[in-house]
Structures are given as structure tokens and as C-alpha cells.
């Protein structure tokens, strides 16, 4: 029924896909080929976010990374819920129990019986608005911090600057997330002013 391959960690996920995931929250960017269960993808994306935070840990940016992680998680949850509800409304036949399980894994406890399905789906979407309010709040916090870019253009601007530093084009389709983190660490180290180099006492 579900037969496919997906990226499971920072060692395998292309940085291009990571950017798409970070911006859209759409876990389909974890799929290499075939079909993979939505629950598997959302759980994997959360695991990759945790791994990313650990690999790129920076004491000066930890608050930003924590907020970024919360934004990723909220965005991923909202996308998973909305996609699942939309699929159920279109009709999923015998797969309905699996789609309902996705909603239950997101914390919804409605009955989702044939006679209550339409109402329960509407209540699910209504309740999701609370998550969107939380997401807006966290994104506002993110805007107030410095660190990981918040827009897709910012990601590519960062890659351009790093490419100039390395003297070759860094193609996000050809490097993994772990490789990007390693390159970013070297770039930051090389561009961090040494003590006393600013001319200030």
C-alpha cells in the first residue's frame, strides 16, 4: 500500500529539500520516490529538526534555534492536518482509518464516524486555528532574533555569500544538510572577529 523511499536524517536529506521543508512545512519534500505514510513523514521531520538543532548548536543562537524548531513543528502539524482533512473530504475509501489515525496522532479526539464525519472535520479545522495563532506568535519571535533565515530568498542569499567565501558554487541540491552545517561552521569561524580585532577595548 505504502511503498517508497524517504530521507531519514541530516546525512541523507538534500539541503534544497530542507529549505523547502523549512519554508513550506510540507513533508512531501522528505519523499525520494513512491508513497510514504504521512505519520512517518511528520515524525521523521521532527527528528530531523532535533538533529539539526543539535548539529548546529551555538550558545549565542540557542534561543533562536529553539524558536525555529517550534515554528517548524507547528508548521508541520498544520500542514499535516490540513492535507489530511482535505484528502478525507475528497474521499479516501478504505484508507479512511489510516487518515483518521493521523488526526488522532495530532491530538484530535473526535469520533469521525460516517454520521459525524463532516461536522468533526469542520471542528478539526476550527481547532487548528489555535495552532495558527501559536505559529504567528512564534514567527513574530523569530523575526525579533538573528540567525537562520526566515524566507527562501534569505537561504539563497546566505548560500551566495558562502559560495563567494569558498570560491565555488554551493548547489543545495548536491549537498546534504549535514554537509551544509559543516560548511556553515567553517564559514562562521573564519568570519568571526578575533578578540581585539575590532579596535575596541
Image: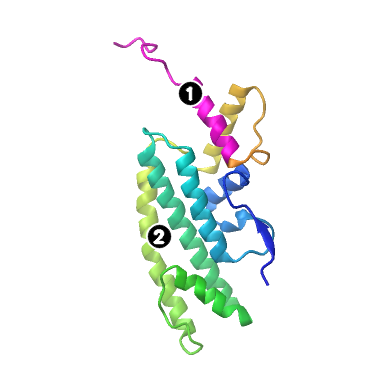
The residue sitting at the bottom extreme is 115
Instruction: Identify which residue is drawn at 45% across, 43% down.
Output: 53
Spot occupied by residue 39 in the image (x, y as percentages of width and height): 54, 65
In the rendered image, which quarter contains the C terminus? top left
Horizontal placement of 57 versus 175: left or right?
left
Color encoding of the figure? rainbow
Spot occupied by residue 164 in the image (x, y as percentages of width and height): 61, 23
The Cα atoms of the two marked residues, 2 and 1, are separated by 37 Å
- Residue indicated by mark 2: 132
Give the answer, above or below, for where 25 lies relative to 81. Answer: above
Instruction: Identify which residue is drawn at 66% across, 36% down.
Output: 171
Instruction: Identify which residue is drawn at 38% across, 41% down.
Output: 64
Residue 65 visible, this orientation: yes
Mark 2 secondary-structure assignment: helix
Horizontal placement of 93 versus 132: left or right?
right
Q: Which mark is residue 85?
A: none
- Looking at the rendering, the stretch of residues picked out in magenta corresponds to 178-201
**Label located before the other in sequence (2 or 1):** 2
In the rendered image, which quarter contains the N terminus? bottom right
Instruction: Identify which residue is drawn at 55% across, 67% down.
Output: 83
Give the answer, above or below, for where 168 lies relative to 65. Answer: above
Amino acid at each position: 500500500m505504502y511503498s517508497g523511499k524517504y530521507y531519514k536524517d541530516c546525512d541523507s536529506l538534500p539541503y534544497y529539500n530542507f529549505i523547502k521543508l523549512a519554508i513550506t512545512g510540507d513533508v512531501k519534500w522528505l519523499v525520494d520516490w513512491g508513497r510514504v505514510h504521512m505519520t512517518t513523514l511528520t515524525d521523521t521531520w521532527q527528528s530531523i529538526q532535533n538533529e539539526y538543532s543539535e548539529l548546529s548548536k551555538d550558545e549565542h543562537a540557542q534561543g533562536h534555534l529553539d524558536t525555529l524548531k517550534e515554528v517548524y513543528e507547528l508548521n508541520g502539524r498544520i500542514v499535516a492536518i490540513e492535507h489530511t482533512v482535505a484528502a478525507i473530504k475528497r474521499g479516501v475509501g478504505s484508507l479512511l482509518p489510516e487518515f483518521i489515525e493521523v488526526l488522532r496522532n495530532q491530538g484530535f479526539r473526535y469520533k469521525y464516524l460516517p454520521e459525524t464525519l463532516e461536522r468533526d472535520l469542520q471542528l478539526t479545522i476550527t481547532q487548528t486555528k489555535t495552532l495558527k495563532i501559536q505559529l504567528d506568535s512564534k514567527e513574530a519571535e523569530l523575526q525579533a532574533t538573528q540567525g537562520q533565515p526566515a524566507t527562501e530568498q534569505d537561504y539563497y542569499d546566505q548560500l551566495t555569500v558562502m559560495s563567494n567565501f569558498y570560491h565555488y558554487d554551493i548547489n543545495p541540491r548536491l549537498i546534504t544538510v549535514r554537509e551544509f552545517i559543516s560548511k556553515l561552521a567553517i564559514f562562521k569561524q573564519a568570519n568571526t572577529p578575533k578578540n581585539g580585532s575590532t579596535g575596541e577595548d
